[in-house]
Structure formats: C-alpha cells, structure tokens
Amino acid sequence: MADLQTPLVRPKRKKVLVDYLVRLRWIPALFIALPISALIYFSVFVGNTWSAMKSEKRRQKEHEENIKRVVKRLKERNPKRDGLVCTARKPWVVVGMRNVDYKRARHFQVDLSAFRNILEIDKERMVAKVEPLVSMGQITKATCPMNLSLAVAPEFDDLTVGGLINSYGISGGSHIYGLFSDTVVAMEVVLADGQVVRATKDNEDSDLFYGMPWSQGTIGLLVSAEIKLIPIKEYMRLTYTPVRGTLKEIAEAYADSFVPRDGDPAKVPDFVEGMVYSSSEGVMMTGVYASEEEAKKKGNRINRVGWWFKPWFYQYAETALKKGEFVEYIPTREYYHRHTRSLYWEGKLIIPFGDQFWFRFLLGWLMPPKISLLKITQGEDIRNYYHDNHVIQDVLVQLHKVSDALEFAHRELEVYPVWLCPHRLYKLPVKTMVHPEPGFEQHRRKGDTSYAQMFSPTLASTTLPPLLYGWLIRNHGYQAQYAVSELSEKDFWRMFDPSHYEHCRRKYGAVGTFMSAHYKSKKGKKSEEEMRGASSTMPLTVKQVVDAQQSGTGEKGAPFVVDGVEMANIRLVGMVNGKVERTTDVTFTLDDGTGRLDFIRWVNDASDSSETAAIQNGMYVAVIGSLKGLQERKRATAFSIRPITDFNEVTLHFIQCVRMHIENTKLKAGSPARTSSSMGVSVSSGFSESSTPTSLKSNPAPLTSGASGSDTDLNKQVLNFFSEPVNLESEHGVHVDEVYKRFKQLPKEKIK
C-alpha cells in the first residue's frame, strides 16, 4: 500500500478483447450515438415547448388523469402471480452507472412516462410544482428567465426531479440549502393500495415526507413535488482560486472558500465547487449572483461557457493553476449546466478527441451523447468492464474528514480529478436513512450549526469496495446510490439507518408490493429467488429460531430453515438481559417468553455507540439481524436495535409470527426448503410484513353527522368504520389514530 510520497504501482494485467472494444467505443459514439442524440434532444425540445404552451388548468387535468391510470394499474396487480412493483422506465434510461439489474428479473411495471410536465410556477409562494420526470434542463429553462431558480439545481440537464428526491441530488448551492430533497415543500405519492397522499413536513403524513428521500421509490410512487424557488440574477460572478500544497492544505483551502474564518455570513458565496487535479494542486471556485448591469460594466469579462465550441469546463478551470486567481461573469443558466457538455470529464473517455478545438468547433453542438444511447449500445462485457475498472461514484463525508477522504483516495486509487461540493445535512425530527453524526451539535466543527452538519461529496471507487465501504462505515459516511453498489445487506444497513425507512414501509403498505432499497441498489443479476425475497424480513419467535435447522448438509454458511422456509434476515421482539459492553461490540440476550437468544451488535462508529447506549437491561426492543451457527450454538448478529415505545407492537409481532407459521405449514409436507417470499413473506433488510399490502391508512368516507350529532349516531359511525372490509380483513386491527383521522371534525374526547 503506497503512502502519499510513494506512487501507487499496480501490476499490469494482460489485455483482453474487451479492452480494445472499450478503446474503440468512440466509433459507435461518434457515428451512431451523437446523431441520434441530436434527434432525441430536438424531440425533447418540441415536447417541452408543447407542454409549456398548455394552460395550467390543462396540465393539472392531465396530471389527475395520469394518476388515475397509475392507481388502476396498481390495483390490477396480483400479489401471488406478479412480481414486485417498479417503474416501466428502461434500465438504460437511468442516468448513472448502475445496471438496474432488478428490472432484468420478474417485476410488475407501472408506467410513469407521462409525468413530465411543470404543473405550476407559484411566484407568491416561491414554489415550483413539477412531475417526477421533469428534468433540470427543462425547469431551469422555465425559471431562469423569471430570475428564479430551484434552490438546489444539479448540473446535468437530464437529471430528473424523481431521481433527485428518491435518491440523491446536490449542487454548488447545497452548502446553504442542503441536498435536493431538503428543498422539497410537499410530495404527492401513490401508495401500494392506490391511495394518493400529499405529504409535508408538518401534516399527518410527515413521516412519509421524511421517509421518501434515499428510499429509491420503495415506499410509494412519487407523482409530483412542490420545490422551493429562490430569486437569482442574470449572471454568476465566478472567482477561480488556485491552490497548491498537501491534500490536507487543499482541503483546508476548500473549507475556507465557503466558511469564512471570521464567521462573517456576508462572505459566504452563493455557489462553491472544488477540483483537485493531483495530490498537490487544485482549483476552488466561488460564485455570487450578479446583475446584467454589473456583468457588462467596462473591464468585466463575460464567458459564455454554454457555447458549443468553448473548452470543457473542468479543463478551463485548470488553467487557473497557470494564470493565477481570476474573476469572470457567466450567464447563470449556462453556469448551472457547465458540466453537461463534457459529462464532467467522462466525455473524454467516450470520445478521446472530444476536447480538441477542431472537434468542438465542428461537432461540439452535438455533445453530449445521450447516456441512454451509450448504455444501450454497450454489451454486458463492456458494462461489467466499466463496473470493475472505472471510478465514477460520490461518497458523502463530514467536512472535517475531507482531507482524510482525499488521502485515502490517493493512497488506494490515485485517480484524478476529484470533484468537491459541500452540502448541509440537516438534523431532522426523525432519524432518516442519512443523518448527521450523533452529538455533532455539542461538538461543532467548521461549517456546522446547531441544526445541520456540513458534509461534502468526494471520490469513491468500484475497484476496492471492502476498503472503501469499511472506511465509510467507520467514519459515518455514505455512498450515493446512483452508482454501482457492492455493499452486502448487512453493511448497507450499517451505513444507512433502517428504522424510519422500515416504519414507513410498514405503515404505508409498501412491504410485499415494492422492493427494498438494498435489493434495488446492489450489483448483479437477480435470481427468481432473490426477486421473491426482495421485500422484507421474517418475523419469528426465539423458540422458532432455536428450533431452526440448517438447510442442506448443514455446512458452514448454509441458511437456517423454519417451517420449511429458508431464513435470510430475522426480526424478533423481546426483553434485553445480560447486556455486556466492550470497545468493539455489545452482546445481550433477548428473551421473548418463548426462549432466549444471544445477540451481538458490532460497534463501528459513534452512531452505533449511541444506538447501543440507549439499550438497557429490562427494556423491550425490536431487533433486525441474521442468524449464524457456531459450534452447535446459535448466535444472531444485530443490524438494528430499536426500543419499543408502543406495546401494541409486541402483540402485533406475535400475531405476525402466528400468521407466518400457519401459512408456511399449510404447504405440502416434504417439499424442499423455500425462500420466505413463497409463503407470503419476503426477505430483505427491513422489518417484516405479509406480501399482501395492508396499509394502515383507510379509504375516507364522508362524515354523516357533525359535531352536534347524538352519541348514538357517533357510536354507529365508529362501528360502521370498524366493519369496513379493509379493517375487518386486517390482522393489525385499527389504530386509534386512524379513528381520529376519519372523524377529525369531532373532538378526540368525544370519540373516546
């Protein structure tokens, strides 16, 4: 392993056919992808222009009709016959390196292709209401002439609102506004049972509002979003500052570029971006909105970076290392999409001479080729080659650990350039999949506030996943899920917190209908068994676990079988006893009244320590984990431990265990072990539910008597509500909050 002074030298491997095919990728890119891309861009332009010409009323009417079609399609799904739900978007259309392998297994498609309209630009509320397939290029074209913009406007034209909310989105303004999902005001979501809800941070569906980001569409189908707008000016005054020194000094200069040492908020720029070109050189760019009048003053330089023949932006920025610091003005929309034409620096890998002046002048107007065309023209061998040998990922680390991340990337990869862009990670009312370090507000570092911790994306690799992922997990970092992931299920849920995500999947009936987040993100083809097992964990009692036997010959690593069904992950509920804390792990015994089972929870970072510190002897907890056999003794590894605050959950868990046992034992005796999904329950990383969605939300009915009605009328209405088929069929019963919500016009005391 090299240090920072010793170059990293890797042994040369023998070239194979795919190496030469990759080198010649420019031929189909130049003669096929570029011309067809031009036609596609023109058709998109015509479609967007036609959409903009429609009246707001017509666009809204089309939106409502499209939602009805989605609801109808969801209700056509047969859980026993059809696969799990995902969109009908083709795998190669997705912007990113992932293969979207889950769409190559059996699945139930729901077409959202019609949801590509900007529904409303509300200048009074400063909100844009848009559908999920609206692209960044489309929305900036509509808003920038009004001197308005999304608070976070990611750089690529083709990035869509749905992908940026369900996954990850960032821009140079994220050090002020956070990630793209943090700028969302409301989301309109179609749930598994066909209900359409509008979730905001302070209404009855606020848990859904906080659960959707990073969920990758595994809780519900996003059909519109209301997103925050900000006022802007016509130009961006951009300052290019060269930096030389060690990686630590480059990281310090990067932090100083947007966190003034004197704390003066007036010195915080509107936009920030850093490029690290080697282990000793980088360029920091800071932008401030400027008026057209200021930009056109005598002596000021205007750079139209959006023109087709202009140098690619990352190469142009590098000239600051020779010129020294300089300032120029760039039209705001052109600045937003400064990396689109060159696909950051990927364009040179696709067309090696694409950055040459002669090519830019003659054919630069055709750039970039559509990513979907590049994907569809590559075979599986080339796709796997890129996965194994190509670095194109973002990792999110705390600002104070950027220097460590850069040194790690140099030591293990030595791949440049590296893109840096800061963002706030807000402390929210609930612990979402991605969250700040526990206790950061008591130990603030540079860029932190009492309500947000400053993070920064930097480089990740597909070639050294164990080292990279281990480093991220230990350092409370995250991998952006648009890229290839080789995280195991265990490590995925060590990196991302599952508690609120799984709460939302249970509450909103997603389990058994939508795939799990890990299943959608992991690399590799999905077998039929994996496809069936992509929805949930298996609820068990300790006795069932103790009585479980390993399948097959019982060799090491073989899965355990309960009621003829192979277990992957398990969920148990019980009381903690015998807790023992050590530096690297916490062990305890879980007692649920049917027996006792030993658990171990590995402690890798501060969040793990915080989770285990909250668990005390005598406390009831819900545990997600996996089962291992060790010298004829069973020990479970816990991925997540959550205190039980509502003891109805204990009862519900045992009801689920009974139901699964009855369903599993109905099958023919002597049949081979099956995955748990064939029994109406599936295997993944989350809490368990049956595969038939049972939403805790009920279909509303009109209230027939007001608050002044008699007690007899009220009692009759409540009884009628309990007698509705959806409530009679639910083994969960009806939560009191659902009764309050149905009769929200009446005082809670009267309902009780």
Image: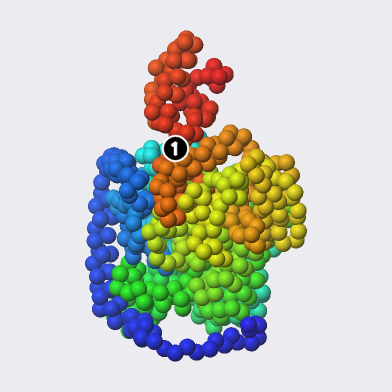
Q: Is residue 728 visible?
A: yes
Residue 529, x across and y down, in percent? 41, 58
Seen in the picture, residue 299 relative to 520 is either above or below; the reply is below
Q: Nearer the viewer, residue 56 or 681?
A: 681
Q: Secondary structure at mark 1?
A: loop
Q: Is residue 441 visible?
A: no
Which quarter of the rendering shows the N terminus? bottom right
Residue 363 in the figure: left or right of residue 715: left
Q: Nearer the viewer, residue 750 or 645?
A: 645
Q: Amino acid at mark 1?
A: Ser
Q: Residue at x 24, y 52 (%)?
A: 50
Q: Nearer the viewer, residue 227 or 199?
A: 199
Q: Residue at x 72, y 62 (%)?
A: 584
Seen in the picture, residue 5 relative to 386 is either above or below; the reply is below
Residue 570, x across and y down, in percent? 55, 51
Which quarter of the rendering shows the C terminus? top right
Residue 341 in the figure: left or right of residue 185: left
Seen in the picture, residue 205 relative to 312 is either above or below; the reply is above
Residue 248, x across and y down, in percent? 66, 74
Q: Residue at x 52, y 64 (%)?
A: 553
- Give the labeled residue for mark 1: 695
Report the number of discs. Answer: 1
Most extreme residue toward the front is 670
Residue 38, x across and y down, in percent? 26, 69
